[in-house]
Amino acid sequence: MAQLPYIEPEDADPITKQVYDKTVARFEMVLNIFKITGNAPEIAEKMWEIFFEILRDGQVDWVTKELLILKATKMGDCLYCVTQHEAVSARLGVSREKQQDIVGVEYRHSAHYTPAEVAILDLCAHVVLSPEEIPADVWQRVRAHYDDGQVVEIVATIGAYLQVSKFGDAMGVELEPVWHGHDPVLFAAEPPTSKAARHHLEHFLEAR
């Protein structure tokens, strides 16, 4: 259950409406996680700007960043984020099979992943679990494929989605009705562990 009201587009102030317009451009709808930040327009405007920058081609292409988002939020057990970005990454051309192989360490042996992608997914896993103990060989493999600016964008993407996933979970943001009956990919391969995530997964599986 959401801890604050969702601010619907028709009730939004001008600043929030601008945020919502950018949201629709990325997600094709105004998501509940954006609506809940409509309670603090000035904070929301600045909070979401980094995500709007991430969700487009930059020094690192958008598809690659979607892989990082899926990996980080799956490891964080965020059903909300994973569900949204399964849809976004699919729209950008990431196959269901490639999404499935992101779970655990399957990607290391998957024909769907390049050595560059394997390197940054290994980095992502370490950032989630032990950011101060990232092995030198992981950094070496990452640096073999990405320059300094790209490394900053990669780690910023991971960090941003760890932050927003915890924000959404703390606020009790609920999946939108459009996702009820959604066919999960990552959580079908490995079920969630948290009580809330399990409840939501069961809810929309029942609606299928």
Image: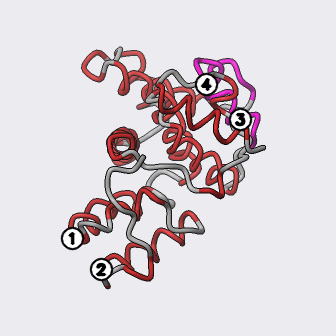
Eye-nearest disc, 3 or 2: 2
Q: Position of residue 65 (x, y in %)?
A: 50, 46
Q: Nearer the viewer, mark 4 or mark 1?
A: 1
Query: Residue 167 at x, y = what percent?
Result: 32, 45
- In front: mark 4 or mark 2? 2
- The vertical placement of 115 against 170, above or below, is above
Give the residue type at disc 3: Lys
Q: Which mark is residue 162?
A: none
Q: Residue at x 50, y 44 (%)?
A: 81
Query: Which residue is under mark 1?
Result: 42
The residues bearing labels 3 and 1 have C-alpha atoms spaced at a distance of 38 Å
Q: Give the numbered dot on residue 103.
A: 4
Mark 1 and mark 2 residues within 8 Å of each other at the beta carbon: yes
Q: Residues within 10 Å of mark 3 (few under 14, many from 20)?
A: some
Query: Which type of secondary structure does the marked residue at label 2 adopt?
Result: helix
- Give me the disc on residue 15: 2
N-terminal of the two: label 3 or label 4?
3
- Residue occupied by mark 3: 98
Q: Amino acid at mark 4?
A: Val
Compared with 206, 171 (above or below) is below
Q: CA distance from mark 3 to mark 2?
A: 38 Å
Measured Cα–Cα span from mark 4 to mark 1? 36 Å
Element type at mark 3: helix
